[in-house]
Image: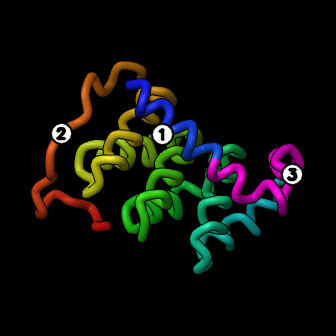
Amino acid sequence: MKRVVLVAGLCCFLVASAFAGDTDLETVLTSPPGIEVGLLQKLEGCDTCAKQEAAFLLGCRKCPNAVIPLMAMLHGGESESCRIVAALSLCMLGDSRGTFAVKRAATFDSSQKVRTLCAWFYNQYVEEGSFAFVRQGPVPPNMALGGD
């Protein structure tokens, strides 16, 4: 369990440090709602780092318009890190559609790392004790949501 907490903390640190030089986190979090439009546009871009930055900030700002794009990122993210940041943001948002998607990803994602962190985020932000364990071993190919 300590390893999962360490990985989650490291993930959050890496996402936060990716934009630390360009944007002051406090400024983004306290700025007016108009900034969310720009963040949603970044979420649709090609740059993986920018997508992760935008996803994290939208989760921190609890932007309800971000639920569907973040769910798309969780299900179709090209990398584990994209799917992990999307799961964290969806759990921070707390919308029932998004948290359900994270709960499903905790069971069916193709990556053990993503499954473990989805379960951990769900336990931390949505419903404590929901996942007493994370499914071990490979997920059958017909149940996988996407592949890395």
Give the spatial CA distance, label 3 vs label 1: 24 Å
Q: Which residue is mark 1?
A: 7
**For the residues marked 2 and 3, what is the alpha-carbon distance in whole angstroms?**
39 Å
Look at mark 3 in the image and give the residue it sits on. 24
Q: Position of residue 65 (x, y in %)?
A: 62, 57
| Image quadrant containing the C terminus | bottom left
Which circle's residue, 1 or 2, is located before the other in the chain?
1
Asked if residue 22 lies in the magenta stretch, the reply is yes
Q: Residue at x 61, y 57 (%)?
A: 55
Q: Does the CB distance between marks 1 and 2 fall below 8 Å?
A: no
Magenta portion: prevailing SS class: helix
Disc 3 marks a residue whose amino acid type is Asp
In the image, what residue occupies the spot 32% across and 49% down? 105
**Magenta residues (range):** 14-31
Residue beneath label 2, please?
Answer: 136
Query: Is residue 72 depicted above or below 5 in this figure?
Result: below
> Within 10 Å of the Cα at label 2, are there few (<14), some (14-19), or many (20+) other Cα atoms?
few
Task: Count up the numbered dots.
Answer: 3
Specify the quadrant that holds the N terminus: top left
The amino acid marked with disc number 1 is Val
In the rendered view, tell whether residue 141 sits above or below residue 132: below
Going 32% across and 45% down the picture, which residue do you hit?
A: 115
Q: From the viewer's side, name the closer residue of 39 and 14.
A: 14
At label 3, counting other C-alpha atoms closer than 10 Å, the crowd grade (few under 14, some 14-19, many 20 or more) is: few
**Left or right for 7, reference 44:** left
